[in-house]
Amino acid sequence: MSVQVRVPELGESISDALLVRWLKEDGATVRADEPIVELETDKSAMEVGAEAGGRLSIRAQAGERVRVGAVIAEITEAAQAERPREPELARAVERPRAPQRPREAPTAAERRPAANGDGARRPERVATAPEPPRPASGPREARPADADVERVPMSELRRTIARRLVEAQQQAAILTTFNEIDVGEVQALRQRYRERFKARHGVDLGLMSLFARAAVLALKDVTILNASIDGDDIVYHHRVHLGIAVSTPRGLVVPVVRDADRLDVAGLERAIADLAARARETKVAPDDLRGGTFTITNGGVFGSLLSTPILNPPQSGILGMHTIQPRPVARDGQVVIRPMMYVALSYDHRLVDGAQAVSFLVRLKELLEDPARMALAA
C-alpha cells in the first residue's frame, strides 16, 4: 500500500508554492512525521512531514511550482517496499522490437561530387546523413569581466518582500515620528524579578514582551493605530493581533500573536518565543502570518540606532525599536548618563493624524519609564 504526499492547504488565497528542496533522497526510507520536503509560498517557508513510514518515491523536482493538492511524492509502506522488483532485463526481453526500415541506396545525384573553390570536386553530404553531435548545453562559462559577479535567482519569499514593500510605499502615505525612552527602570525591573519570573512562569522576562505589553496598552488609548483602511471604509479592530518581525535566513517574516491584548507579560513572552523559533525553523503555518493589526520590529538587536520602518499593509502602524545606548541626558537639572533607546512609529497619514501618532509614543514612553503603570493599567 502506498500513501500519496500532496501539497497541503497553504492558507487563504494561496493556490501554489515553490518546491524548494527535498530533505530526503528519492528511494530513501522515511519515518512517519519526519520532514521530507520544504515548500515556500509568497508569505512563508514550511516543511511537510511524511504521513507514513516507508520508501519515498519523488514525483516533483526542486524548483517546480506545485499547486495545492498536487501529488509530489508517494511513500510505499515498508512491507510492500521490501518486495523484490521485477528485473529490468526480463521486462526488456519481453518488449517486441519495432522493425527497422532498410536504408535506401543513394541516387546518382547524391553520389556526384560537388565543386569547391579551386575546381576540385568534394563529396556532397547526403541529406539523410546524421548531423554531427552538438556539445551538451550547460552553464555558460564566465567571461573574465564576469569573474567577480555571481547571479542568484531571488527566492519566492524575497520577491514577495520586495513587491510588498514597494506596494506599501506606493499605496499609503507613510510618515514617521520619533521619541526616545529611558529604559533604566525596565532594565532594573528585569534584574530584580527575572529569576522569580522564570521560576514561576517557565519563561524569561524579555525586553520584547515588555515593549509588546506597553504597545498593547498604548493602542487601547490610541485605537486608530489599530485600525485599517478598506476601500472607503475604516475598519476598527476590537482585538490587538500583534505582528512581531522575525529575521530568518530567507528574509523577514512577521508572525502574529493573536489576541495580544488578552495576554499578560508571561503569555506574550511565551507566544513571541514560540513564533520566533518556528519562523527560524521554517515551521510557521500560513495562519500564523495572517490578520495582524499592528507590528513591532526590533532593529536594535543588529545594532541599529535609528530607522524608519515601512508599514505592513493593510496595517496603519509599525513600531521600530532600536539599540540601547548610554547617553547624557538632563534629569532634575543635572546631566546624567542613562540607557536610552530611540523609538520610531511609522503610520499611514491617510488615517492617522500626527497628534495621534505622537500621543501613542508619549503613552508608550510613560509606561516603559514607569513600568508599575503597566501593572496598574486596566
Image: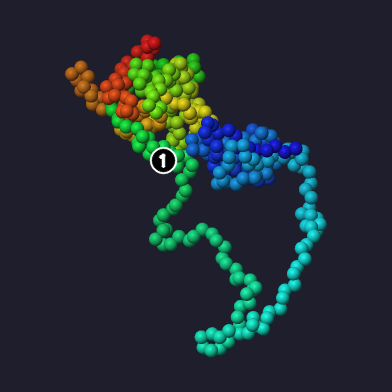
- Residue at 64% x, 81% y: name it: 110
| Picture quadrant of residue 297 | top left
Q: Is residue 282 left or right of residue 242?
A: right
Q: Residues within 10 Å of mark 1 (few under 14, many from 20)?
A: few
- Residue at 37% x, 12% y: name it: 377
Question: Which is more toward the observer, 264 or 100?
Answer: 100
Furthest residue in direction left, as rendered: 333
Number of residue marks? 1
* Residue 121 at least partly seen: yes
Work out whether 342 lies above or below 116: above
* SS under mark 1: helix
Looking at the picture, how far across and down is residue 365, in whole percent?
A: 31, 20
Question: Which is more toward the observer, 167 or 140?
Answer: 167
Furthest residue in direction bottom, as rendered: 119
Q: Is residue 274 left or right of residue 168?
A: right
Q: Is residue 316 left or right of residue 60?
A: left
- Residue at 44% x, 26% y: name it: 292
Looking at the picture, how far across and down is residue 209, in whole percent?
A: 42, 22
Furthest residue in direction front, as rendered: 232
| Residue bearing the label numbered 1 | 162
Question: Which is more toward the observer, 281 or 324?
Answer: 281
- Residue at 35% x, 36% y: name it: 169
Q: Amino acid at mark 1?
A: Ala
Looking at the picture, how far across and down is residue 325, in whole percent?
A: 30, 29
| Picture quadrant of residue 190 | top left
Looking at the picture, how far across and down is residue 232, in whole percent?
A: 38, 26
Question: Which is more toward the observer, 251 or 290?
Answer: 290
Quadrant assignment for the C terminus: top left
Quadrant assignment for the N terminus: top right
* Residue 218 at least partly seen: no
Q: Is residue 36 left or right of residue 317?
A: right
